[in-house]
Amino acid sequence: MSAVAGHALSLQGVAKRYGDFTAVQGATLEVGNGEFLTLLGPSGSGKTTILMMIAGFVEPSAGRILLDGRDITALPPERRDFGMVFQGYALFPHMTVAENVAFPLRVRRMSRGDREAKVRAALDLVQLDRFADRRPAQLSGGQQQRVALARALVFDPALLLLDEPLSALDKKLRAELQEELKALHRRVGRTFINVTHDQEEALSLSDRIAILNHGNVVQVGSPEGLYERPATRFVADFLGKSNFIEGEAAPDAGGMALRRGGTVVLARGTAPAGKALLSLRPEKIALLPGGGVEDNVVEGRIAAWSYLGTGYAVTVATQDLGELRVHLPAWRIPVAPSEGLAVRLGWSRDAAVAVAEDAA
Amino acid sequence: MNPRGRHALGWWALIMPAFLLMTAFYVAPILQVLAISVTEPQPGLGNYERLFTSESVQRVIGTTLRIGFITTVISLLLGYVLAYRIALAGPRAQRWWLLAVLVPLWISVLVRAFAWVTLLRRQGLVNEGLLAAGVIEEPLALVWNELGIVIGMVHYMVPYAVLPMLSAMREIDPRVLAAARGLGASRAGAFLRVFLPLSLPGVIAAGVLVFIFSLGFYITPAILGGGKTLMAAEWIKLQILDLIRWGLGAMLATMLVVAILATLAVFSRLVNLRRLFGAGG
């Protein structure tokens, strides 16, 4: 596979309405050259519709799609030259692995010699050269997925579109193929656009993630950026887990102070005086030993707990902040958790971040 | 006897009445026909010799194969278009289409054959219409010849062609077609390289079904052929009932059964007929 650079894609106010139902409302998104972008959202958030509009299978009701500045909104799918890995792979059951991979080249009328070389290179790329003469039905799920990848990459497409590529696989295999997919992206250096509802997959694979909800692009950013600084309650809740603390905010020397009942929670950032919402990740809360000090200290009783192997998920009932979910590393927990046990929770000022309430 | 064996015996007991009925009223007469073909008028293979010596026997076989073949090809073409249209229609429309395909099956063959005669004869609707429109000067010979037989038989066979092809087309994953388009194939390319090959087992099954039916067709060729074009079934009837040449008629009947079994044997190697004719598994 030659080291041709990828291409940049730009969505400008792309919308899709089906009668009264709006699947996507004016999505605007820039996908950079060689980037791995993931569209992440719950089912019905419009992520697949956006991908289908990029692929050309669904015609936008409004807006434009540009590839390297050229308007491709009206082009049919076969003239866009995008590679695509379909949900469930959609391999051609009547063709061998090699014939499947050769398909995009055949319809482009490439000569037999060039075709064979390309197919061999593509099968090498996904380590399936030994399976060239098998039929898809004779392959495992992971192997079928790799055939779909080879078939989508063999013709040096401008973009690679992935529609829930790993959703049909079991958990262990999924983790393996995530690594492979990431390595493949690095090797071919092409622009990848991936659709998934699996937040772990999105975090581990992507250069950037676009989070969708109700047909809107809610926030776009790097995985760390989104996880550490979610803009809204939805983003904080969908990407990982979060506690939410609502209260009256006021500026304070080190950032902001949020008052709820008799408790004041210190957080970074600034907030206009008035109602505010904080997101606090469960793993950023620690169990303080007697006499331990932190920016924020709250007392409570354990309401529920469960052991997860890597740690304990503990729910602590507090007087002013309600129930707080806490994730504690198993090997560092200072007490044996039990229901009703009185504990002191502590977290630093940097742990909590102000988020916006979701637009109704 | 172990419980499993007793279980199997129970099943056999259930099948037994049907098995006996089939043997007594179906298999036995067929064997008798086979026997007549080598015993009448005198024992020996004299009747089968006619296959190679008698021009009239050869002409009947030729006509039967030719009409069967033409009917099969036309029925497959029409049936494929119909099945394709039905397979791509929405679930509601699909039900109406299927009904439209199946309704003719509920009307008697005899009624349909006579209906075609009224339409196609010299003073029929088609000829009168074309004459009135000034398209033709002389009425066309549309019936009481091979053309008439083919028209009537195609009309009868199209539903039998549609059903196996439709069942094959319904098994095609629509995402596979989208994948073909997404990977650069035009609409026509996706059809030719993906849809057509995937529907081919259904086409073969439909072809076998229609061809076998056509070989033994009796009523439609008898009425629409007007006694001038003879197909195997009518010829057999002629030998046995009119000319009282039982041996000759039985010989051709046997050949018909052999031809049908041979066709099935060849194609069952090519495709899984059991599955296509709805036996499941």
Image (tube, helix red, strand yellow):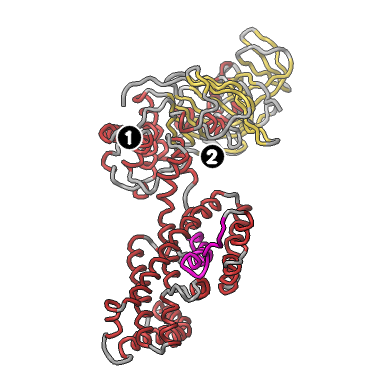
Image quadrant where one finds the N terminus of chain B:
bottom left
Spatial CA distance of label 2 from label 1 is 40 Å
Q: Write down the chain letter for disc 2.
A: A
Q: Is residue A117 above or below residue B105?
A: above
Q: Could you tell me residue B159's position as x and y percent?
A: 53, 63
Cβ–Cβ under 8 Å for marks 2 and 1: no
Q: Could you tell me residue A284's position as x and y percent?
A: 54, 24
Residue type of the residue flagged with mark 1: Val
Going by the image, does B38 lie left or right of A287?
left
Q: Pointer 1: what residue? A: A126
Which of these two is toward me, B49 or A38? B49
> Is the stretch drawn in magenta largely helix, strand or loop?
helix
Going by the image, does A22 lie left or right of B279?
right
Q: Write down the chain letter for disc 1.
A: A
Q: Pointer 2: what residue? A: A306
Residue type of the residue flagged with mark 2: Ser
**Residue A204 seen in render:** no
Which of these two is toward me, B59 or A210? B59
Magenta span of residues: B136-164
Q: Residues within 10 Å of mark 2 (few under 14, many from 20)?
A: few
Q: Could you tell me residue A125's position as x and y percent?
A: 31, 32
User: Which quadrant would residue A5 be assigned to in this image?
Assistant: top left
Q: Give the SS element for disc 2.
A: strand
Q: Give the SS element for disc 1.
A: loop
User: Which quadrant would residue A359 be assigned to in this image?
Assistant: top right
User: Which quadrant would residue A352 be assigned to in this image?
Assistant: top right
Which of these two is toward me, A323 or A136? A136
Earlier along the polypeptide chain: callout 2 or callout 1? 1
Q: Is residue B74 above or below residue A278?
A: below
Image quadrant where one finds the C terminus of chain B:
bottom left
Q: Could you tell me residue B89's position as x and y percent?
A: 58, 49
Q: Does the magenta portion include B150?
A: yes
